[in-house]
Image (cartoon, rainbow, N blue to C red):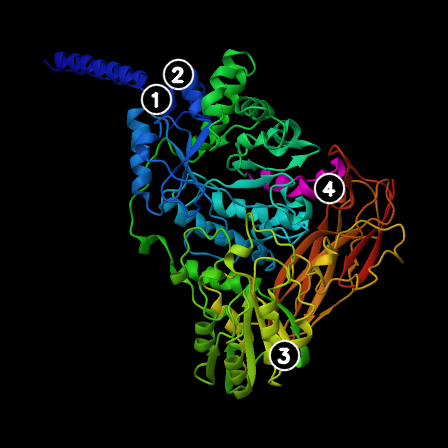
């Protein structure tokens, strides 16, 4: 009997095993989470029709959009096979509804990737990126990007169109607010930090999202600072100035890139095979995908490359652009181009592979839906607000402090004047995600919280940000005469910088300058607090002010940080990542210029040729004394290791943070090189009386070498200089 039972059991086990095997075989390989991603992609592509493949290469919109030019489409109008949607809502319900349509109504159930412009925050808005660069703290920026990723992913967004790493040397261009300043290496360091913050070690985690490096490449060179226009970029400049940040971002693992509007050597970025295929894919081995900027494929017609939208689709796709954002060029014409033999199926399959690869890495096939949570569980978490406050504080730059008027002590009557003092909206900055002015602590409130227990504060607007209404001047002057010190809060409105916000002059409107003149008549110390999205022309206001604090557009939690710097509770540590010209007429002006054949001539006859505040400028309430820069060797051979160290002592009475910038200069080279190039920076907190050592580990090929017009790297024998805080150390490279 026992033998019969055993035989029956074995038979049943066999049947069960057979059924399990059959069930396993019935599940498509691409749905097997345990299978290798590339095998899953192979299987999925083999099952797709041409129409299904093409739709994966298109991006539409979904949800509310504050930009009147971009109108979202209802779920019912969006095909279930669409590859991507720009998601303008703040809650995941709409996303989940659309995703359900994709998963259940399409034949293969391919999830949609939802993107959004979370540039410097999603709902918890941080300082603009230009301000962040002035912190010289990439670790802190990484934390901020991680917060953005957490908020966005929990709100239904899997992909951010950030970071923007366009090297920009013309502050008339409004988009300088979105990048990390004038230096290629700085942009690259913050690009890598942003990618790490957004994507983490595992992009599929519920609190991470895919990053997108933009705008690839050279958009920051827009002629005369005018947006969308032609750029004149030589092959040499392309490589040694504009490509480096993207290479560093790609090496950090950036999942995607966005093409640029501008031309590169006469070929628009969105149709340029050299940068998209030759460099990005073949040389750098990037295996994600490229998305166009909004409507950029169709705009190839405006640029004079394509006669029709169909031609535009052919140029862009054959150049290596995988996803069309809102041109409707691929969805309408790509099938026809394949049938005509102008685009091959192999190209289509490769493009689809790249899009699917990102979706698999995001874990969308396993978790297509976003759990619905309360906003309080997603936004303004205490740790998120702490990062916002610290980043704001470290981004602020003390530009001027005559006679140590700051920090303010023993001031019992404080006048707070200016249109930015009780203005929340304009503190957010351009591309402020889902930020609201009601989220922002206003500057006046921050000052009240900081000084209210020890001093009386009185407020007067004085004037609006622009216009000719001087009726408020008298009231502002009365408040100033009453006070011991005047804090005047001026700057740019949110819409004055950012995309399509070019300005012919970077001076503030005349009404704001005249307000400062009026306040000076009171005979009291004037502290200028600036909130803006670009470097400003300050040569007329600067002499009228005893101190100037640049706070940029600090986001929702900058007011208390600003007030803390003025009171001395916080020691300022920010340093400029972009030069402040003396005059708009000096533009472009930047630190790493090429050498002149007549360095003793070529100066302006009517104004100084020096900037008002140079790259790296920033004051502190303490004093730092630099020791002697000491290299590990003064003669090296190729392949040798080289390092340099310098001690920095805080000789003042206050604790503070100092950033050491390490520059390299190549006095003589087979190509002309900049007067100096930033190759490393490090920020450390140093207590009063304490000494810290800063170290630069030099890679000879990377830091002493240069690239030619096709990106080939060279290292020549000869003399090199290491420059730190006025010191020059000579290094000889011998073969």
Q: Which residue is mark 2?
A: 47
Residue 238 point in image, percent of width and height: 71, 38
Q: Residue at x 90, y 53 (%)?
A: 598
Q: Residue at x 35, y 52 (%)?
A: 378
Mark toward the viewer: 3 or 2: 2
Distance, label 3 to label 1, CA atoms, is 68 Å
Q: Which residue is mark 3?
A: 653
Residue 523 located left or right of residue 208: right
Residue 588 located left or right of residue 426: right
Distance, label 4 to label 1, CA atoms, is 45 Å
| Crowd around label 2: few <14 · some 14–19 · many ≥20 (10 Å) | some
In the rendered structure, which disc, 4 or 2, sits on the residue that comes first in sequence? 2
Q: Which residue is mark 4?
A: 240
In the image, which residues are magenta? 230-253
Labels 2 and 1 touching (C-beta < 8 A): yes
In the rendered structure, which disc, 4 or 1, sits on the residue that comes first in sequence? 1
Q: In the figure, residue 40 lies in which quadrant?
A: top left
| Crowd around label 1: few <14 · some 14–19 · many ≥20 (10 Å) | some
In the rendered structure, which disc, 3 or 2, sits on the residue that comes first in sequence? 2
Q: Secondary structure at mark 3?
A: loop
Please say whether residue 247 is one of the residues in the magenta stretch: yes
Most common SS among magenta residues? helix
Residue 253 point in image, percent of width and height: 55, 38
Please say whether residue 673 is one of the residues in the magenta stretch: no
Q: Which residue is mark 1?
A: 108
């Amino acid at each position: 009997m026992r033998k019969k039972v055993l035989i029956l059991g074995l038979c049943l086990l066999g049947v069960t095993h057979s059924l399990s095997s059959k069930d396993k075989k019935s599940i498509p390989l691409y749905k097997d989470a345990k299978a290798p991603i590339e095998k899953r992609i192979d299987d999925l592509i083999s099952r797709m029709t041409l129409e299904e493949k093409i739709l994966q290469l298109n991006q539409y919109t979904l949800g509310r959009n504050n930009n009147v030019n971009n109108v979202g489409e209802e779920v019912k109008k969006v095909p279930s096979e669409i590859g991507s949607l720009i998601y303008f809502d703040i809650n995941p319900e709409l996303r989940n509804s659309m995703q359900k349509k994709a998963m259940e109504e399409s034949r293969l159930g391919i999830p949609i990737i939802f993107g959004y412009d979370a540039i410097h925050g999603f709902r918890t808005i941080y300082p603009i990126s230009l301000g962040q660069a002035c912190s010289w703290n990439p670790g802190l920026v990484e934390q901020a990007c991680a917060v953005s990723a957490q908020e966005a992913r929990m709100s239904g967004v899997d992909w951010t169109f950030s970071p923007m790493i366009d090297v920009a040397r013309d502050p008339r261009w409004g988009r300088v607010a979105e990048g990390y300043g004038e230096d290629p290496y700085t942009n690259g360091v913050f690009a890598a930090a942003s990618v790490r913050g957004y994507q983490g070690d595992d992009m599929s985690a519920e609190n991470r999202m895919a990053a997108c490096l933009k705008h690839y490449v050279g958009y920051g060179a827009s002629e005369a600072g005018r947006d969308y226009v032609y750029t004149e970029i030589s092959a040499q400049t392309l490589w040694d100035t504009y490509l480096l940040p993207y290479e560093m971002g790609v090496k950090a693992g950036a999942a995607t890139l966005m093409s640029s509007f501008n031309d590169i050597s006469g070929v628009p970025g969105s149709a340029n095979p050299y940068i998209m295929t030759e460099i990005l894919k073949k040389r750098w081995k990037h295996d994600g995908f490229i998305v166009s900027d909004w409507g950029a494929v169709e705009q190839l017609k405006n640029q004079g490359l394509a006669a029709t939208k169909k031609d535009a689709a052919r140029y862009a796709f054959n150049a290596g652009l995988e996803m069309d954002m809102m041109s409707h060029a691929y969805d309408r014409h790509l099938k026809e181009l394949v049938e005509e033999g102008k685009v091959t199926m192999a190209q289509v399959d490769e493009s689809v592979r790249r899009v699917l690869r990102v979706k698999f890495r995001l874990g969308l096939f396993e978790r297509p839906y976003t759990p619905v949570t309360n906003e309080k569980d997603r936004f303004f978490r205490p740790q998120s607000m702490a990062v916002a406050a610290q980043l704001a504080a470290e981004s602020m730059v003390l530009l001027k402090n005559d006679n140590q008027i700051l920090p303010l002590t023993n001031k019992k009557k404080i006048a707070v004047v200016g249109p930015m003092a009780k203005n929340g909206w304009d503190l957010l900055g351009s591309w402020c995600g889902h930020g609201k002015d009601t989220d922002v602590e206003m500057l006046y409130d921050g000052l009240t919280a900081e000084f209210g227990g020890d001093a009386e504060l009185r407020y007067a607007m004085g004037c609006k940000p622009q216009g000719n209404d001087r009726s408020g001047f008298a009231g502002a002057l009365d408040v100033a005469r009453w006070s011991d010190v005047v804090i005047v809060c001026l700057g740019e409105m949110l819409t004055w910088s950012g995309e399509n916000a070019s300005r012919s002059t970077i001076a503030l409107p005349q009404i704001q300058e005249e307000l400062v003149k009026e306040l000076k008549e009171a005979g009291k110390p004037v502290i200028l607090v600036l909130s803006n999205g670009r470097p400003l022309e300050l040569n007329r206001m600067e002499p009228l002010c005893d101190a100037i604090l640049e706070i940029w557009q600090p986001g929702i939690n900058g007011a208390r940080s600003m007030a803390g710097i003025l009171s001395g509770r916080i020691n300022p540590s920010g340093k400029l990542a972009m030069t402040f010209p003396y005059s708009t007429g000096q533009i472009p002006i930047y630190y790493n210029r090429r050498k002149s054949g007549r360095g003793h001539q070529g100066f302006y006859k009517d104004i100084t040729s020096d900037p008002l505040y140079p790259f790296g400028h920033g004051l502190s309430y303490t004093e730092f004394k630099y020791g002697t820069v000491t290299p590990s060797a003064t003669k090296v051979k190729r392949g040798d290791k080289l390092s340099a160290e310098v001690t920095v002592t805080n000789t003042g009475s206050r604790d503070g943070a100092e950033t050491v910038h390490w520059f390299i200069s190549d006095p003589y080279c087979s190509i002309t090189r900049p007067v100096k190039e930033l190759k490393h920076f490090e920020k450390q907190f140093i207590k009063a009386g304490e000494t810290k050592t800063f170290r630069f580990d030099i890679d000879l090929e990377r830091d002493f070498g240069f690239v030619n017009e096709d990106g080939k790297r060279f290292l020549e024998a000869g003399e090199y200089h290491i420059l730190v805080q006025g010191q020059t150390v000579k290094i000889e490279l011998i073969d």
